[in-house]
Structure formats: structure tokens, C-alpha cells
Amino acid sequence: MIPIYTQTVGAGGASSVVFNNIPSIYTDLKLLISARSTSGYGAGVPSLAIKVIYNNDSSESLYSSTWAAYVGPGSGRYSGAAWAGWLNSSNSLASSFSSNEVYIPNYTSSSFKQTLTESAVESNETTNLYLSMHGQLYRNASAINSVKFVPELGNFAQYSTFTLYGIKKS
Amino acid sequence: MSMFPIATYTLPSPGPITFQNIPDTFTHLQLRVFGRTTASQVPDQVFIRLNNDTTAGNHNWHYLQGDGATASSGAGISNETGIRCQAIVGANASANVFGAVIIDILDYTNTNKFKTVKSIGGGDNNGSGQMGLSSGLYRSTNVINRIDIYGLFLQFASGTRADLYGLTTSTVTGA
């Protein structure tokens, strides 16, 4: 597993984080993310959704996902939207950042892209908290050369970190 | 390469496992536990404590799990002295059956962040078992330099192994 890129959000926050020019020499990709948003839906809602967009393709009709989460416990689907995970909102406990892992196997293949995300959003609450697993389908056969993350509300807060790793099968 | 072995320990007799003097030269930590406990039940759980901090209320945890019949979730958000991670098998599991848990702690040296712990794991026992995903929060911005690992109900059995890895990141942004 080789670290390709790392971005750390500075004092001004960031409306999105993008990794461009992803080299095509690996088999799979993996991202580790520790993130928080500058905004939220109010007290008692410590989580926000996060969009994962490939190749700057904002045609969200090509995205769908299935998830299972702590709240409920529950399960659901998104269709026609690029939601794939959750992060800490500004209403979560201060200094708390989500722990997300996004796994993108066979990212250069000519098949549709199936990705897996685990999201750990922690706060001192038992409601609206989205410890979760996501499977996201991007119905495009092109190789992935960029990945973009966008929070549901606000910006990524200072100290949010994103690292992209490449994994070779041999 | 970005994932480096820091230390490994295999128990010669029942007990906990401790990693001390963890170097602060990495960005993330990954802990892998392969084992079983001495508790008289099939599922037990891995319980960790960071920096030997037993302060009640310094920890939260949440879990989402299934046992083959029922999906359930739960939480500990007050007076917790450590973090429950995911399930591992206990003494009532069949012989030679061990559970596996992978625990991630991102940005463990970042003094601007509380430490979020994510774990996935469990064990199948050919007709019983438990699997799940858990999160935990250590409400301290201190650098993590010690991890103590316990079975939640009783001790780890001999033969239980824990491996600690450090992960590095890139200096290139790719923006």
C-alpha cells in the first residue's frame, strides 16, 4: 500500500477536497479520511452526509448506494445521488472528527465501479449518529482518475485530513 | 510502502496485551487482534484503553452488529473507562476457532483532535457468532503512546495475537 496524495484542510476550511491525476499503475485505491464539517442541522444531529464523486462527474444519476447504520439500526438506499458515508457535523462534540475508509477495487477496469465505505462518526449521543457501512455504485466504465469529497453542509473544517493510497496486487 | 509493523505480541498464557512507547513518527495506527477470550460464552468483545486513561466519561462507543438472526446496535456514552471494539469469540466457541478484529486510529498524534477509533470484526462459529462495525471516541487531544487491550468479560486466551502497525501519508497533495 503506497501513499499517493495527502491533503490537510487549513484554517479557512475547504468546500471540497479533490485528488486529481490519480496514477493508473495500481490495482485498487484506498482512502483514509478524518473529517468534520463547519456546519450542521442543529443540536442533536451530530452527523452529516458526504458525497464521493468520481472523475468530476456530477451526473448524480449515475450514482447509487446501499447503507446500514447504527441508528435504528437501519438500512437504506440512495438512488441518483452520490452520498457515500457520513462525517461529524459542527453539532457533534468539539474536537471530534469522523474516521472513514473508502475502498475502490479495480479502479482502472472497464466495469462499473463498486466501492465500500466505513464511516465512524462519534459524539456523546445515541441519536442521529451514523456509524455506518456504505456500498456505492458508480455506473461508468471509465477508469477513475480523480476523486472529490463534498460535505452535505458547510465546508470541511480545519485539521480534516484525506490520504489516498494505491494498492498493487503483485 | 506505507504500513509498517511496530510491534506484535502473542500471549503465552491468559491475560491482556499492552503496547507501550508507541513511536510518534507515523500518522495513523492500525491494530489487528486475532484471538479468543476465556469468558464462558461464544461472543466476547475486544476492549481497549488508550494512554492507560481510566477516567470515567473520557470515552464513548457505539456499535452495529449482527449475530445471524438479529441486527442490533448500542452505545456507551457516559462513565465509560475505555472503548468497546468489535466482537471476538469466547471460551464456548469450538476449539481452534479464533475471532479477528481490525482497529483503526487515525491522526493519533494530532493534538487538535480527540481520537476516533473505528473497528470491524467478529467471528463465525459454524452456527453461532457475531460480526459488526464499531466506533469509539477517546476525549483527549494527547498523542497516543500506549494501548491496552482486554477481553471485555474476561481475559484473552493463550495464543491470542495482536499486531500494531503504523501508517504514513504522502507529501504530495494531488490537488
Image: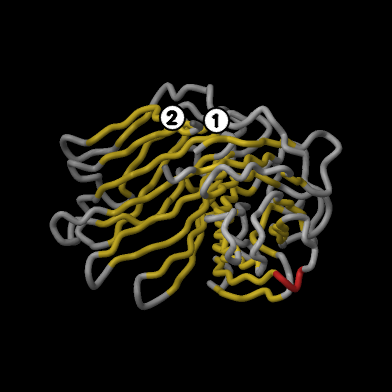
Residue name at image x 69 percent, y 46 percent: A35
Q: Nearer the viewer, residue B29 or B21?
A: B29
Judge from the rendering whether residue B161 lies leftward or rightward of residue A115; answer left or right: left
- According to the picture, the residue beneath numbered tag 2 turns out to be B4
Give the secondary structure at mark 2.
strand
Give the secondary structure at mark 1.
loop
Q: Work out whether residue A96 can be spotted.
A: no
Question: Residue farthest to the front?
Answer: A110
Q: Nearer the viewer, residue A34 or B169?
A: B169
Q: Work out whether residue A94 can be spotted.
A: yes
Answer yes or no: do the residues labelled 2 and 1 have beta carbons within 8 Å?
yes
- Coloration of the structure image: secondary structure
Residue A46 sits in which quadrant?
A: bottom right
Question: Residue farthest to the right?
Answer: A12
Callout 1 crowding tier (Cα within 10 Å): few <14, some 14–19, many ≥20: some
Label 2 – label 1 distance at C-alpha: 8 Å
- According to the picture, the residue beneath numbered tag 1 turns out to be B168
Q: Chain of mark 2?
A: B
- Residue B128 lies, with reference to residue A33, above or below; the image says below
Residue B4 location (% of width, % of height):
43, 29
Judge from the rendering whether residue B53 lies leftward or rightward of residue A155; answer left or right: left
Residue B24 location (% of width, % of height):
52, 23
Q: Chain of mark 1?
A: B
